[in-house]
Amino acid sequence: MSKETGIVDLESSDWGSEDFVLNYPFKFRGMTYEKLTIRTPNGSDIDRWVKTGERSFRSLAENLTEIPGEVFDRMHGRDYSRLMATVGAPIGGEG
């Protein structure tokens, strides 16, 4: 995003991302998970999510974080619920 105009140049960047800090960090398969980076969805992400028919926030989260689904299976339930609410927020949903 240009600091002067506040306009995102989508030719050289995307809508950005946010860090989702886990309240219950964990290790799984040699990796430590303390936070996840969630890419801000664009129109194409939402369109793909709607067209696939698997309209779960989980499938959207897997796409936006590029984290294997089995990692979500191991997350603490409270972190998982917060993550689903965070992922669903841009499309008016709640996890």
Image (tube, rainbow, N blue to C red):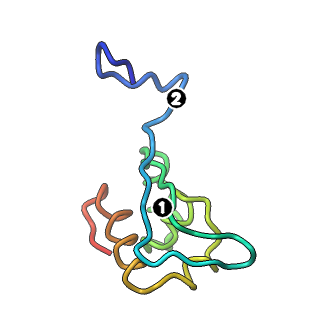
Q: Which mark is residue 88?
A: none
Residue shown at 32% from the left, 75% from the top? 95
Say which amino acid is labelled 2.
Ser
Residue under pointer 1: 49
Residue shown at 47% from the left, 55% from the top? 38
Q: Is residue 50 left or right of residue 4?
A: right
Query: For the residue carrying disc 1, how many other residues have a C-alpha within 10 Å: few (<14), some (14-19), or many (20+)?
Result: some
Q: Is residue 70 left or right of residue 62?
A: right
Q: Nearer the viewer, residue 75 or 63?
A: 75
Residue shown at 51% from the left, 61% from the top? 36
Q: Nearer the viewer, residue 72 or 22?
A: 22
Give the structural element (helix, strand or loop) at label 1: helix
Give the structural element (helix, strand or loop) at label 2: loop
Residue shown at 53% from the left, 22% from the top? 11
Q: Residue 29's x, y, as percent?
A: 74, 78
Q: Earlier in the sequence, mark 2 or mark 1?
A: 2
